[in-house]
Image (cartoon, helix red, strand yellow):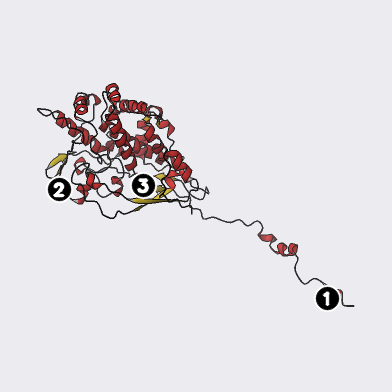
Amino acid sequence: MFPESSTAKTKLETKNFLSFLHGFTGTRIMYTNQSKLSYYNPSCHMMDYIVHIMNTMLCDSFCFKRDTPNYHPYILRLYCGILFWIQCLRAGNDVNVLTNVQHKFLNRFLDNHPLETLPVPGPLLGLFETLCSSQPEFPPHYGKVYPRIPVQPGPAQRDAFMRDDNLESHFLANVPRIFALLKDLNRLFSQDPPVYPKRGKHIPVKENAVSTFGHKTFGLHVDRTEAEKWSLVSPGLQYPCEADQKLNEAFAERYIDFGFPVTTATDNLGKISSFLHMKRNMAWFTHVKEVANSVAAFFEGSGTFDDCSPHGMVANQVVACLSPPKHLPEPPTCIADKRATYEFSYKLRSTARNCCRVLSDAYQPPLPRDIWIENS
């Protein structure tokens, strides 16, 4: 007979093999901690497009104009432009990135104009709901994503027109220039005889004329810099005035009732309060808000700023990849130059697995077929 040791099993049993790994059973997979904040540069171009469509509808509505005598398309542009900045400030406050100056202004604004008193027209409600901070998947390994706005929104002097050293300025509502549209329109009203522009004919800066607009003097088109040319279609100036001659004539009698602040060429627009023209007084915004209330009542599905949380939807985690057009557009020759607009294609990609649902909820029309969603 063979010795017992020679007949013993030569292969390790499973339980014996796992016993070798007993000391490693409590080991966890460690993820790299990337809890720093991420940001994106918000763009108001889609908002401006929707506001333009809304203004066109309102200007064509006899009943609305009859019931809202203080309405003018520039007033709605101004209101929405200011709300865009305020919502970005609210999102920044949610992630604690505001400067002391920004934080004080936001609190002062909301003390004077509480969220529930700020109407948001139905066509814009979904857009403002997505303008917020959000938490990526796998918390707490990744920090929040928020819309970042420049600490210095405008130039050191108003007659510089806009900051040409900051690309973000071409994607954020140019509130001082919307004020310039109103001031220039009032200048025409005050002439002898008064001038009431027809629809699409209020063009303060033209191609072959030296013009002063927003306290800045624009030379002939051939003498303007590239920055000056493209500033003529900055947010708030891209679309021609939707008001017709009769509406402009009616607004001429109402302009003084708004009590807009006086502007000078040397105004420093570096702080958010000055940029939004609320440094000393924001009572004028109450009259603008009254017009917005009538606009919100005109459109179905309207709400208030209280419906737009500063934190929530992951729609801001979708990256839009733009493809350049076949032919680059020509530099603008005047305000609201249609030749400066161009078609382009784009794709969307995101690491947020539910971004398709969020985008569909925010915007009622279904996603176009040529949008590509990548989950990686």
The residue under label 1 is 6
Q: Residues within 10 Å of mark 3 (few under 14, many from 20)?
A: some
| Between discs 2 and 3, the one toward the N terminus | 3
Disc 1 secondary structure class: helix
Q: Which residue is mark 3?
A: 41
SS for tag 2?
Answer: helix
Closer to us: 114 or 23: 114
Where is residue 222 drawn, in percent x and y? 14, 50
Q: Is residue 199 above or below residue 17?
A: above
Label pair 2/1, CB-CB below 8 angstroms = no
Task: Say what amino acid the circle numbered 2 marks.
Answer: His
Residue 221 numbered tag? 2
Question: How many numbered dots are placed on residues in this image?
Answer: 3
- When asked about the image quadrant of residue 256, the answer is top left
What residue lies at 27% left-to-right and 31% top-to-bottom? 75
Name the side, left or right, on which 77 lies relative to 110: left
First in sequence: mark 3 or mark 1?
A: 1
Report the amino acid beneath label 3. Asn
Q: On the picture, is 14 further left or further right than 229?
A: right
Residue 306 rendering spot, x and y as whole percentages:
42, 31
